[in-house]
Amino acid sequence: MTDDDVVKLRALAESGDSDAVDQLVELAGERGDFEELRRLAAAGSRDAADELVQLASERGDMDELRRLADAGNRDAAEVLTELNDQGHCGD
């Protein structure tokens, strides 16, 4: 996918095209693009928020998990609790 394709998808997503949002979430997840996922999650994409939690968990990114948990993401809070219980606090 080219940069122009991504720009077009973003425009479609911003106009409310849920398929475009889904494609952006998938692409950002494949690329490990936290910034894109954060932007999509902030715009209301639950799938983007879920992908952020998954990526952060896989990478052991405690800061990202804390940021998400502090913003009210219950899944991130649960992952943090699990990781802390396993002794992976990352501090």
Image (spheres, rainbow, N blue to C red):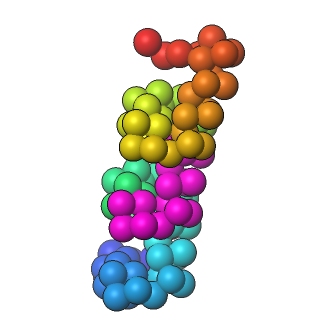
60 up-or-down from 40: above or below: above
Q: Is 5 part of what is drawn in magenta?
A: no
Instruction: State the predominant SS element of the stretch in magenta.
Output: helix
Left or right for 43, reference 24: left
Q: Residue at x 66, y 25 (%)?
A: 82
Instruction: Give coordinates of residue 3: x percent, y percent.
Output: 33, 75
Residue at the image point whose x is 46% and y is 71% from the top: 24
How many numbered circles are shown? 0
The percent coordinates of residue 7 (x first, y second) are 31, 80
Please identify the quadrant where the C terminus is shown: top left
Question: Residue at image x 49%, y 16%?
Answer: 90
For residue 68, above or below residue 79: below
> What range is drawn magenta here?
41-56
Give the side of residue 50 with respect to residue 17, left or right. right
Quarter of image, res 40: bottom left
Q: Residue at x 38, y 55 (%)?
A: 38
Q: Which of 79 and 31 lies nearest the eye of the viewer?
A: 79
Q: Is residue 46 left or right of residue 67?
A: right
Q: Residue 33, percent across and down?
A: 42, 54
Is residue 64 among what the camera can see? Answer: no
